[in-house]
């Protein structure tokens, strides 16, 4: 006799004809179904706590940099949109969101006199500023649940042609998540308002991004940017990203 190789979704025991079937899966008994529900509730609470902490850290940095328009949150939401063209794995998408949100967290370790300098940086000041990806990576490395997010933090200033920093990585040596982030960071830098100027149009940003495909940007990431242009235009016009946690982590 065969039982069609079915196993309880929670405890994994082999299932009989009298099993407990639910839309979430088949269970050997009601107790296993209820236990799994409980586990899932704990996971959702944990994700919400991680997200709230990460967003709080990112907004602390935005405030220190005198950013008024939720820059970190916007680039995280916009990068997440492009990331969905690469994967539908929720854990990978979480890492992309967290890494994008905290991309500049290493700037916490840069002196105000450099970070907030009103005017061009000297070569020595740039040397300091260029340390921020590694500082950020060190900060996030302490949190094992942010391992892949830390890769974005480390590589977000790299350029496709190898002219970026801190390691001068080129092409696919740069994680795909950092390659799409880079396109979005430029979109946000061009289209958002600054104290000394109004943000430029989406079309202006798009022209810059297309011009730098193959040099600063990965051509494939630029193609994905173009394929999501309609949604990105709407998000940029709204000056925000997604409305809720459910939108961020679609199950
Ligand atoms: Fe940066």
Image (tube, helix red, strand yellow):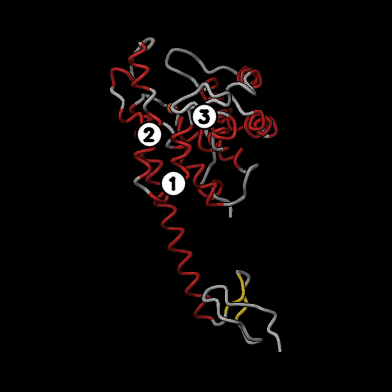
Q: Position of residue 245 (x, y in %)?
A: 50, 48
Which image quadrant: the C terminus? bottom right
Q: Nearer the viewer, mark 2 or mark 3?
A: 3
Residue at left 61%, top 18%?
Answer: 208
Name the image quarter holding residue 24.
bottom right
In screen coordinates, is 21 left or right of 132? right
Q: How many marks?
A: 3
Rendered image: mark on residue 200: none
Rate crowding at label 2 as few (under 14), some (14 to 19) or many (20 or more) other CA atoms within 10 Å: many
Rendered image: mark on residue 105: 2
Residue at left 50%, top 37%?
Answer: 76
> In the rendered view, would you say 116 is above or below 169?
above
**What distance separates the C-alpha of mark 2 from that of mark 3?**
20 Å
Q: Secondary structure at mark 2?
A: helix
First in sequence: mark 2 or mark 1? 2
Residue placed under numbered mark 1 in the picture = 147
CB within 8 Å, label 2 to label 3: no
Name the image quarter holding residue 107.
top left
Q: Position of residue 6 (x, y in %)?
A: 64, 78
**What distance separates the C-alpha of mark 3 from that of mark 1?**
19 Å
């Amino acid at each position: 006799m065969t039982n069609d190789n079915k196993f309880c979704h929670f405890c994994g025991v082999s299932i009989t004809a009298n099993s407990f079937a639910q839309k979430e899966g088949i269970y050997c008994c009601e107790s296993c179904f209820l236990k799994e529900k409980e586990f899932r509730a704990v996971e959702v609470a944990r994700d919400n706590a991680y997200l709230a902490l990460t967003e709080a850290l990112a907004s602390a940095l935005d405030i220190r940099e005198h950013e008024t328009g939720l820059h970190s949150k916007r680039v995280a939401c916009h990068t997440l949109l492009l990331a969905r063209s690469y994967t539908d794995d929720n854990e990978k998408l979480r890492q992309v969101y967290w890494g994008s949100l905290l991309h500049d967290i290493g700037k916490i370790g840069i002196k105000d006199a450099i970070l907030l300098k009103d005017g061009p940086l000297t070569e020595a000041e740039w040397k300091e500023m260029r340390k921020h990806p590694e500082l950020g990576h060190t900060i996030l490395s302490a949190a094992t649940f942010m391992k892949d997010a830390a890769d974005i933090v480390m590589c977000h200033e790299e350029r496709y042609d190898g002219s970026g920093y801190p390691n001068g990585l080129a092409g696919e040596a740069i994680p795909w998540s950092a390659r799409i982030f880079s396109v979005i960071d430029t979109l946000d830098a061009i289209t958002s308002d600054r104290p000394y100027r109004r943000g430029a149009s989406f079309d202006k940003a798009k022209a810059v991004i297309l011009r730098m495909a193959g040099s600063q940007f990965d051509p494939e990431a630029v193609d994905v940017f173009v394929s999501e242009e309609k949604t990105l235009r709407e998000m940029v016009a709204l000056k925000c990203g997604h409305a809720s946690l459910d939108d961020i982590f679609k199950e």
